[in-house]
Image (cartoon, grey):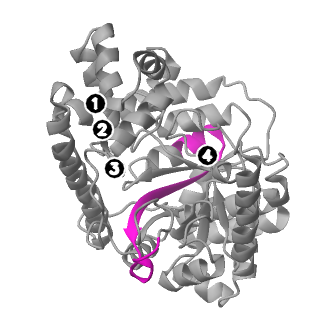
């Protein structure tokens, strides 16, 4: 493998070695203000199989200096991504995404179609190692293990219906991920992989033609279109109406408030997530956000592409209006905005175009939100001063506007490279905070 491909190695030492070499002579494009704070890595599922190091490298060389990774049920990429940020001179944030149950909306769809009460929620700004044996680490392990149990149950329901391509979790699914954290998308890819092993071309087309209820010609075209193939197979095997689908209940996922409490205990920032405003649970943005804030949320996560990149003009207008409503509501509640383009499905944009017609009105809000998360990360890593921590609460006395401005100012400083990081570490947390505060006043690092 060449050095760039080595960035995707499942061996962490190989990835670090490759990144160090590539960072020495990396040619960067002109700097851009665009940000992507919601990028999945191969620690949960990345459509290109990119590691945290590969994500950092690919975005940095394109002149993008404010990034966040986010994975389902794990923060396995945290240390690697922050270190990659130091090597490449980019601002970083690390997050986690999961599904949780909201009892108050148990009769309403929120942002998981067809699943009342189920909510995709997230958190950003993880920056501190979770100590082995701590309650925080035990809870994270519980989330990982619960996800594994759901995966095993899903496979057990699917396999009898597709015996010719049945998968084994240990031998077919886990090798697709570096740290044993498989997702539904890994499982679907394993079934597709097994079909390619089990059948020659004509038989492969016939198999999927029958299973997906498509003509032979349609099946041929689907097999050649990998993103479409994965989505159709996922729908047939795992989603609502599929062989493996099981309606979730309040016991399937953790409670929203429990997840948010855990996030806060980790000195990270809990986030409500927004789909597109078309469900009963998202119909009243203020009600949704006030409920979420009461449970512990302190920011809002949005995938903008879902809200404007739509062919049907009427649907596009509806969702753009819904996007304006949720953003206006978040601003009224002083909630930072956290946006991104995921990369967990082929065909998604590399980054949102914040200068495009639909998103330009919110560009500065999106940038400031990214700065708050990256500023929080710097302050937490080096000064033990997190956005929701005791020190921050004492300093800002519930003045969220001033707090947001301060954390955004830290995020607007030049990226923390290896030299700056070493200086801040050696200073100790109290002195590091003073250095960071002085640097904000001068808008440059005062080391």
For label 2, the residue is 187
Q: Quadrant of residue 367?
A: bottom right
For label 1, the residue is 191
Report crowding for label 3: few under 14, some 14 to 19, many 20 or more residues within 10 A (C-alpha): few
Q: Is residue 167 left or right of residue 191?
A: left
For label 3, the residue is 241
Who comes first in sequence, dot 4 or dot 1?
Answer: 1
Q: Are marks 3 and 1 in contact (CB under 8 Å)?
A: no
- Looking at the image, the residue that sits furthest to the bottom is 397
Who comes first in sequence, dot 3 or dot 1?
Answer: 1
Q: Is residue 38 left or right of residue 405?
A: left
* Closer to the eye: label 2 or 4: 2
Q: Are marks 4 and 1 in contact (CB under 8 Å)?
A: no
Who comes first in sequence, dot 2 or dot 4?
Answer: 2
The residue lying toward the viewer, choosing from 422 and 130, is 130
Q: Please tell me whether mark 3 sits on a helix, a strand or a loop.
A: loop
Who comes first in sequence, dot 2 or dot 3?
Answer: 2
At x 72%, y 68%, the residue is 327
Magenta span has 438? no
- Mark 3 and mark 1: Cα distance apart in space: 18 Å
Q: Quadrant of residue 277?
A: bottom right
Q: Is residue 347 left or right of residue 402?
A: left
Q: Are marks 1 and 2 in contact (CB under 8 Å)?
A: yes
* Closer to the eye: label 4 or 1: 1
Residue 435 placement (x, y as % from top left):
69, 66
- Mark 1 and mark 2: Cα distance apart in space: 6 Å
Q: Are marks 2 and 3 in contact (CB under 8 Å)?
A: no
Extent of the magenta region: 83-108
């Amino acid at each position: 493998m060449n050095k760039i491909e080595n960035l995707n190695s499942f061996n962490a030492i190989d990835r670090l070695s490759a990144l160090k070499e590539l960072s020495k002579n990396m040619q960067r494009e002109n700097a851009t203000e665009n940000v992507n704070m919601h990028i999945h890595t191969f620690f949960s599922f990345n459509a290109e199989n990119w590691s945290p190091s590969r994500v950092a490298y690919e975005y940095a060389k394109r002149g993008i200096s404010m990034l966040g990774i986010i994975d389902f049920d794990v923060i396995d990429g945290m240390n690697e991504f922050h270190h990659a940020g130091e090597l490449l001179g980019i601002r970083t944030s690390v997050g986690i995404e999961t599904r949780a149950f909201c009892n108050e909306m148990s009769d309403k769809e929120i942002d998981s179609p067809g699943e009342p009460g189920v909510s995709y929620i997230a958190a950003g700004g993880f920056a501190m190692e979770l100590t082995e044996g701590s309650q925080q680490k035990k809870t994270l392990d519980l989330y990982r293990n619960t996800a594994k149990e759901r995966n095993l149950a899903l496979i057990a329901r699917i396999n009898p219906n597709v015996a010719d391509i049945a998968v084994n979790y240990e031998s077919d699914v886990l090798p697709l991920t570096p740290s044993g954290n498989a997702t539904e998308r890994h499982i679907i890819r394993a079934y597709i992989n097994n079909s390619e092993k089990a059948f020659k071309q004509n038989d492969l087309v016939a198999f999927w033609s029958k299973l997906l209820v498509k003509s032979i010609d349609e099946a041929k075209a689907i097999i050649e279109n990998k993103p479409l193939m994965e989505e159709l197979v996922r729908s047939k095997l795992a989603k609502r109406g599929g062989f493996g689908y099981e309606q979730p209940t309040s016991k399937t996922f953790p409670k929203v408030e429990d997840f948010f409490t855990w996030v806060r205990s980790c000195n990270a920032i809990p986030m409500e997530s927004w789909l597109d405003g078309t469900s009963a649970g998202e119909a009243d943005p203020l009600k949704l956000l006030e409920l979420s804030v009461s449970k512990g949320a302190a920011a809002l996560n949005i995938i903008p592409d879902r809200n404007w990149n739509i062919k049907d003009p009427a649907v596009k207008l509806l969702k753009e209006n819904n996007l304006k409503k949720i953003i206006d509501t978040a601003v009224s509640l002083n909630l930072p905005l956290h946006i991104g383009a995921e990369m967990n499905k082929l065909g998604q944009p590399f980054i949102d175009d914040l200068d495009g017609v639909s998103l330009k009105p919110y560009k500065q809000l999106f940038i400031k939100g990214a700065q708050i998360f990256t500023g929080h990360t710097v302050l937490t890593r080096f000064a033990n001063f997190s956005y929701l921590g005791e020190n921050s609460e004492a300093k800002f006395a519930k003045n969220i506007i001033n707090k947001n401005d301060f954390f955004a100012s830290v995020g607007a400083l030049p990226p923390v490279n290896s030299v700056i990081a070493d200086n801040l570490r050696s200073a100790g947390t109290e002195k590091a905070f003073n250095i960071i505060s002085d640097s904000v006043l001068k808008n440059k690092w005062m080391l």
